[in-house]
Image (spheres, grey):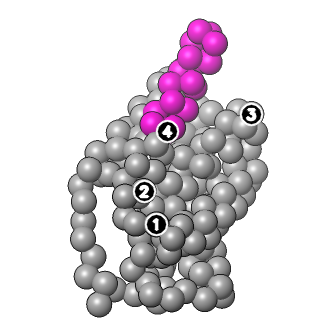
Amino acid sequence: MEIITILVLAIGLSFDSFAVSVSTGIVVNYIQFKPALRFSFVLGIFQGLFPLIGWVAGTSFQDYLQDYDHWIAFLLLGGLGVKMIYESFQGTKVNSSNYNPLKLSTNVSIGIATSIDALIVGLSLAILNINIVLSASIIGAVTVLACMIGLLLGKKIGNKLGRRVEILGGIMLIAIGLNIVLQHTHYL
């Protein structure tokens, strides 16, 4: 898998965190740089750690799945993409008076929730025998950057961007899965 594909995968995975960051920027009245950076790093750490966990689980099954690995990766990534698109239409309202996403326990919960997709991607990366350290590092770094940008944008714009970003992220994951199938079936 080329570095560009890993980067596109990282961008697609970071859209959940980006959307949460935009929402956080809208909900929290005033965000200082240090709490914003901590918030972003927590999400980035989970987004980078979960592919490693998925990769470890996936490497134990690699020999059994080798003939079908591209289809499994497509189904996992495509399913995640469809899930992201579907969830983007399931609007949820947050009671901002009781909700503080910058609180560390809430931040960790958000980090875990937005990284479940990365766990499944890690499984796909193991099946495809991809360099997991490089991939996880890029995924984590892109997520930190996306969160910082999302927090800033949340302060500048309204709630409308979050849903569109999740839809785009879903489309990107589906496209990556399709690309894997096409490469492995020699159509590309």
Residue holding disc 3: 2
Question: Which residue has dot 4 on it?
Answer: 173
Q: Are marks 2 and 1 in contact (CB under 8 Å)?
A: yes
Q: How far apart are marks 1 and 4 (CA)?
A: 26 Å
Inspect the image, locate mark 1, and give the three-letter code of the amino acid beneath it.
Answer: Ile
Seen at 66% across and 57% down, the residue is 142
Q: Which of marks 3 and 2 is in front?
A: 2
Q: Earlier in the sequence, mark 3 or mark 1?
A: 3
For numbered disc 1, what is the local secondary structure?
loop
Nearest-to-viewer mark from 1 and 4: 1
Local secondary structure at mark 3: loop
Where is residue 168 drawn, in percent x and y? 46, 43
Q: In terms of sequence position, does the residue under pointer 4 or pointer 2 come before the other? A: 2
Marks 1 & 4, CB-CB < 8 Å contact: no
Q: Tell me the residue at 60%/89% (across/down).
A: 32
Q: Name the residue under label 1.
A: 157
Looking at the rendered structure, the secondary structure element under dot 4 is helix
Q: Which residue is drawn at 24% across and 55% down?
A: 90
- Going by the numbered disc 4, the residue's amino acid type is Leu
Disc 4 residue crowd, few under 14, some 14–19, many 20+, Cα 10 Å: many
Q: x, y (%) of residue 59?
A: 60, 44
Residue that mark 2 sits on: 161
Q: Nearer the viewer, residue 27 or 90?
A: 27
Residue 39 vs 112, above or below: the answer is below
Q: Quadrant of the N terminus?
A: top right
Image: magenta residue range: 171-188
Determine which of the numbered discs, if any, sits on residue 25 in the image.
none
Name the amino acid, label 3. Answer: Glu
Chief SS of the magenta region:
helix
Q: Give residue 179's quadrant in the image.
A: top right
Distance, label 3 to label 2, CA atoms, is: 29 Å
- Determine contact: label 4, label 2, CB under 8 Å: no
